[in-house]
């Protein structure tokens, strides 16, 4: 196909007009130095999160979703992990440069974190009540009585029945859904300004997932916190979030308001992901597999990482890495997107990228 001409637009890491974002991430770059070489897991990620905004993060397995969010709180194992560049400004301070003691006060305090697997994140030999109190002791200490009362209140807040009895339970005595609620209670213990949730409902059955999502929506309106929600479930994205970051090969390839992304994805990878969705509101719809191999992260991207799988790629895609560029209310990293190419109104996308098929539960 004939390559459209790229018009210049300001790069998306230009300062955002208006209110100061709750979190502002610029050029985040994380690598793992392994025996097999350097894994370029996160490559120049930039995004803003506004107060009270719910941001969804999607992308296939290995695209760098977890490493991005863990890097922000410097939670990646080092070695082999290495945050090679970037800044993450939160409350006027750069989380990546601040003193470790100060950062510990942010982690689990102003920024709550729910990890992918509650069984590995909860301490199996400490009661759930004690674990909530321990978090309060670090971040929001009070009298013993007040902290236990707060722990009870939190378990009630996350909808745990017979909460008073559950305070004394060990994690293995609770169901998966209840453990996940405990994780949320711990993350909420200190009234975080930002809650980062990494696939918090993947291991749960659909009914419990729906309850947890309702709970987070409720808490968001009650507490006014911003949420970053990593998920493979496009139904969750449609029903919960305001804006979506689509990640591929450790980079953001599209950053768009959710309704606009669903109505018209502009990056060919985003289009491939959404092409097989029966409807934007369908719960439990998984990401699709796109034919071809994920990128080899052992070399630094010097061309579009998606180009080998993209039927629309042309010469430039194979020789130059497109930067995330503002294209009218959203950002896209694609050489085709100049307002007249594939991203244009009424553009003919043809068949879904590579032919999409449903992805398994374990993806
Ligand atoms: N400790 C580590 N050592 C080496 N490489 C790692 C390590 N942790 C993550 N990686 C690599 O970093 C890349 C990004 O991983 P990440 O866990 O962020 O993916 P993800 O998008 O969260 O995937 P998933 O959807 O499966 O959770 C992957 O290639 C992964 O193999
Ligand atoms: Mg992950």
Image (cartoon, rainbow, N blue to C red):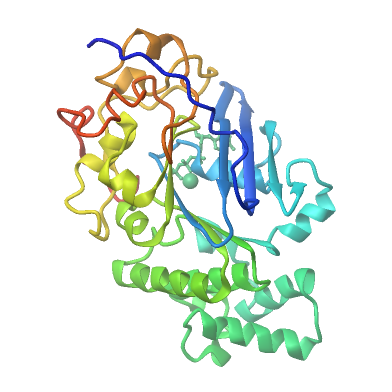
The residue positioned 36% from the left and 54% from the top of the image is 237
Q: Is 330 in front, or is 162?
A: 330
Q: Is residue 111 left or right of residue 292?
A: right
Q: Nearer the viewer, residue 356 or 360?
A: 356
Residue 361, above or below 145:
above
Horizontal side of residue 7 vs 71, given as left or right:
left
Is any part of residue 52 visible from this angle?
yes
Total tally of numbered discs in the picture = 0
Instruction: Point out residue 161 in the picture as x, y percentages from the top left corner.
Output: 46, 88
Q: In this picture, is 70 found above or below 169? A: above
- In the rendered view of the protein, which quadrant contains the N terminus? top left
The location of residue 25, given as percent across then percent down, is 62, 41
At a point 33% along the width and 17% down the height, the residue shown is 308
Front residue of 348/160: it is 348
Q: Position of residue 203 (x, y in %)?
A: 39, 60
Q: Is residue 168 visible?
A: no
């Amino acid at each position: 196909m004939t390559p459209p001409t790229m018009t210049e637009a300001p790069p998306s890491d230009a300062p955002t007009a208006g209110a100061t974002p709750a979190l502002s991430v610029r050029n985040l770059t994380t690598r793992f130095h392994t025996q097999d070489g350097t894994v370029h897991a996160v490559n120049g990620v930039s995004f803003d999160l506004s107060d009270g905004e719910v941001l969804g993060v999607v992308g296939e397995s290995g695209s760098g979703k977890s490493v991005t969010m863990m890097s922000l709180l410097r939670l990646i194992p080092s070695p082999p992990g290495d945050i090679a560049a970037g800044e993450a400004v939160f409350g006027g301070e750069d989380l990546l440069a601040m003193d470790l003691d100060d950062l510990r006060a942010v982690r689990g305090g102003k920024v709550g974190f729910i990890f992918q697997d509650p069984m590995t994140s909860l301490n199996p030999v400490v009661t759930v009540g004690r674990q909530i109190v321990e978090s309060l002791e670090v971040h929001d200490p009070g009298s013993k009585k007040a902290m236990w009362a707060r722990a009870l209140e939190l378990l009630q807040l996350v909808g745990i029945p017979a909460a008073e009895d559950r305070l004394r339970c060990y994690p293995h005595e609770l169901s998966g859904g209840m453990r996940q609620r405990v994780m949320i209670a711990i993350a909420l213990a200190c009234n975080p300004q930002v809650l980062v949730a990494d696939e918090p409902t993947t291991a749960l059955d659909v009914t419990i997932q729906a309850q947890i999502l309702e709970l987070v929506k409720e808490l968001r309106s009650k507490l006014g916190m911003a949420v970053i929600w990593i998920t493979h479930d496009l139904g969750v994205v449609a029903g919960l979030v305001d804006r979506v970051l689509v990640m591929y090969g450790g980079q953001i390839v599209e950053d768009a308001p959710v309704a606009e992304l669903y109505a018209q994805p502009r990056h060919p990878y985003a289009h491939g992901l959404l092409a097989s969705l029966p409807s934007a509101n369908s719960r439990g719809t998984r990401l699709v597999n796109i034919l071809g191999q994920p990128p080899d992260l052992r070399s630094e991207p010097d061309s579009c990482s998606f180009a080998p799988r993209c039927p629309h790629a042309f010469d430039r895609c194979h020789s130059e890495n497109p930067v995330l560029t503002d294209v009218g209310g959203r950002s896209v990293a694609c050489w085709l997107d100049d307002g007249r190419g594939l991203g244009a109104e009424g553009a003919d996308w043809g068949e879904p990228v590579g032919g999409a098929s449903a992805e398994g539960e374990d993806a």
